[in-house]
Image (tube, rainbow, N blue to C red):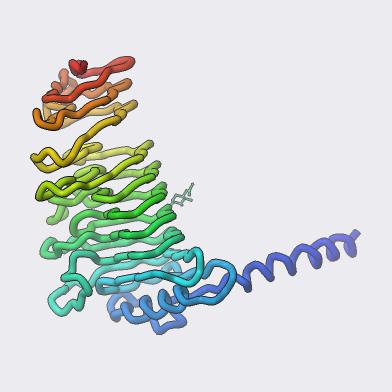
Amino acid sequence: MEVRVLCFFLLILPCFVKTESNSPIYNVMDYGAHGDGHTDDTKAFMKAWEAACSSSSSSSPTMHVPSEMTFMIQPLYFRGECDPKQIDVEINGNIIAPKDPSDWTCHDGCREWIHFEHVDGLRVYGSGTINGQGQKWWDLNALKISNSNNVYLTSLTFKDNPRVHVDLQSSKSVFISNLSIDAPEDSPNTDGDDCISMVDGSSNIQISNIACGPGHGISVGSLGKHGAEDKVEDIHVSDVVFTGTTNGARIKTWQNTAVQVSNVIFREFLGTSKKETAVMLDCSEAAPCTDITLDNIYLRTTHGHNAKSVNNNAHGRTQGLVVPEIPLS
Ligand SMILES: *[C@@H]1O[C@H](CO)[C@@H](O)[C@H](O)[C@H]1NC(C)=O
């Protein structure tokens, strides 16, 4: 019996070992990171990324940020195109921004803290925390993903980030789930920060299982600045708990005729609203919103009173219980 078990292990084990050794791991510690919370680890992160990005291994490389350590990093620009078809970034430790950004060197005028661009096939996940430390003088988005496809972003915690926590631009097939995004209400920087924001050129975006708040909720846009044509389509947001956010789900456009909002379903919105107006469909006369569905909405004010709705130029239908009542036709 013992021998049989041993054989079993001997046969199976080499397979796992082989898979593991084929999947190279680029640990930031091997590239000079300190993880002590105050030494600047930016260069080590860049080197680990560059090594993963140019890996010639046939299986996907992993850039690894170990747990139980804190890494202070300046704005990081993770740029593709990468050689491997897929890159994993496993963040188990805590990433913090420097307290004093006065000597930052940024590639794009410091609009993003961590920016992935031109990456096709990216998974960012882990038990770690992305913590901006709530410095109100930063005008940065915490994590930006642009011009990238097939991106998975899961399981991370975002805390006290300066502006938008997760910003998507010109990216296709992005799957975001199981994130906890929070900025305490007493943080100095809660104005202007969306949990997740999607701007021009994003399509096939799936967002689910998110805890968001306080902050500004989840938003598409603003679209159509300066009359530009922006296309955002096939966006699915589900299973989100908004706590203390100024808005829940929002589609924002500029006041011009370049942006047409249509085929939007708001389904199963349950909760309370601090503002009396809980539902606002505010479309322009020149470009009315069409094919809007409200299905099973039940929103009251935080004081337990009836909430109100506003509808300007939105057309569509209601289904199931819709409270507050919204005339849509
Ligand atoms: C969700 O994220 C938490 C925190 O990182 C993690 O512990 C948990 O395993 C994740 N759940 C799933 C289903 O991925």
Q: Is residue 98 left or right of residue 62?
A: left
Q: Is residue 310 above or below residue 143?
A: above
Is any part of residue 166 visible from this angle?
no
Estimate the x, y position of residue 234 in percent, counting from the top left: 35, 40
Question: Looking at this rendering, what residue extends furthest in the bottom direction?
Answer: 32
Residue drawn 10% across the image and 31% down it? 286
Using the rendered view, name the quadrant where residue 120 is placed: bottom left
Residue drawn 62% across the image and 72% down it? 22
Frontmost residue, 112 versus 288? 288
Residue drawn 49% across the image and 63% down it? 86
Q: Is residue 273 left or right of residue 126?
A: left
Estimate the x, y position of residue 174 in percent, counting from the top left: 39, 51
Residue drawn 29% across the image and 24% down it? 293
Q: Quadrant of the N terminus?
A: bottom right
Estimate the x, y position of residue 298 in percent, counting from the top left: 27, 21
Q: Is residue 95 left or right of residue 193?
A: right
Estimate the x, y position of residue 196 in percent, counting from the top left: 27, 49
Is any part of residue 277 visible from this angle?
yes
Q: How many marks?
A: 0
Q: Is residue 251 above or below residue 33?
A: above
Q: Quadrant of the C terminus?
A: top left
Using the rendered view, name the quadrant where residue 243 is placed: top left
Q: Is residue 125 above or below residue 213?
A: below
Q: Is residue 265 above or below residue 98?
A: above
Using the rendered view, name the quadrant where residue 304 is placed: top left
Q: Is residue 157 left or right of residue 197?
A: right
